Image (cartoon, rainbow, N blue to C red):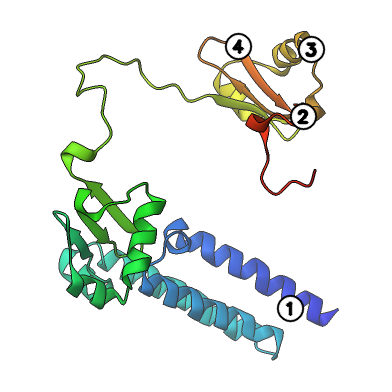
Amino acid sequence: MEILYRTFIVFIAGYLFLKLTGKKAVSQMHSFDLLYIFVLTNIISTPVEVNDLGKALTYAGITVILYKILIRLSLHNKLRWILYERPTVLIHNGDIDRQGLKKVRMPMNELLSHLRVQGYTDTQNIAIAVMEETGSISVIPKSEYRPVQPNDLQLKVKKEYLPIPLIMDGQILDQNLKYLQLDREWLMNEVGKMGEKIKQITLATYLENGKIFIDNNKTTDHQHDPYYYKPGKEY
C-alpha cells in the first residue's frame, strides 16, 4: 500500500507541476525545455524508491519556479539566443546550404524526406527552408510555385466557418450548446428527426446553416468497390 500511495502522490504532483509550467514545455520542445522535463521527471520519481517524498517535491517545486523564471528571461532577445538555438537555413533561393546541413547533422536523403512530407519534390522550387529552434522544418516555396490564393484571382470568399461539435463519442457537449444558446431538448429533437441515438453518434456538429451533421458508428459495405479500398484491412 505504501508503494501505491507514493506512486499516486508522485504522479499527481508531476501532473500539477506540468500544468503549472504551461503547455509550452510539453509541446514542440527546445533543448532547454527537454532538459527541464528530464530533470523534473528524475526528481519526482525519486520518492518511489526512497523515503524522501517531501524533499523531492520541494526540489521539484524549485525546479518549476526556476524554469518559469528562465522562460520569462528568454522573452528578452539577448538572453533568448543564449538559452535557445538559432534557426538554421537549409535551402536558400533553390540552393542547398551544405554548411547548414552539416551544422544540424542532417543527411541529404533526410532533407528530401522532410520536403516530400510537406508536398515538395524539387529543391529548386524552394525559396527558403529553415530548421527552427524546435527542430521542425519550415518550407516556403518560390512565389511561382506556391498554391494559388483567392486574392491572386481577385476573388471574394466568405468567412470561414468552423463546425461546432455538439456530440462526441456518444456524449453531449453542454458547454457548446450553451454557447449557441440551445438546450438538450432541441438537440434530442434534431437527433430524433434523423433517426439516430445519442450513444451511437461518433460526432455531431452544428453547421453554418443551422443544421446538424452526424457521423455515427455505422459503416457501409461498398461490395469491393476499388474507390473504397481500405489499406491494412483483411478481406
125 left or right, relative to 116: left
Pointer 2 or 3: first along the chain:
3
Q: Quick check: can you spot residue 155?
A: yes
Marking on residue 192: 3
Q: Position of residue 54 (x, y in %)?
A: 62, 82
Residue pushed farthest bottom?
Answer: 50
> Relative to 218, is 233 above or below?
below
First along the sequence among labels 4 and 3:
3
Q: Look at 36% across and 67% down and name the residue there.
A: 109
- Residues at discs 1 and 4 in contact (Cβ within 8 Å): no
Query: Which mark is in front, 3 or 1?
Result: 3
Q: Nearer the viewer, residue 135 or 176?
A: 135
Q: Secondary structure at mark 2?
A: loop
Q: Amino acid at mark 2?
A: Thr
Instruction: Identify the residue position indicated by label 4 in the image.
Output: 211
Which residue position is annotated with label 2? 219
Closest to the observer, 102 or 52? 102
Q: Residue at x 77, y 29 (%)?
A: 219
Q: CA distance from mark 3 to mark 1?
A: 49 Å
Q: Earlier in the sequence, mark 1 or mark 2?
A: 1
Looking at the image, is 46 positioned above or below residue 89?
A: below
The amino acid on which the numbered mark 3 sits, given as a three-letter code, is Gly
In primary-sequence order, the first of circles 1 and 4 is: 1
Is 4 on the left or on the right of 116, as rendered?
right
Element carrying mark 1: helix
Residue 142 image point, x, y percent: 18, 44
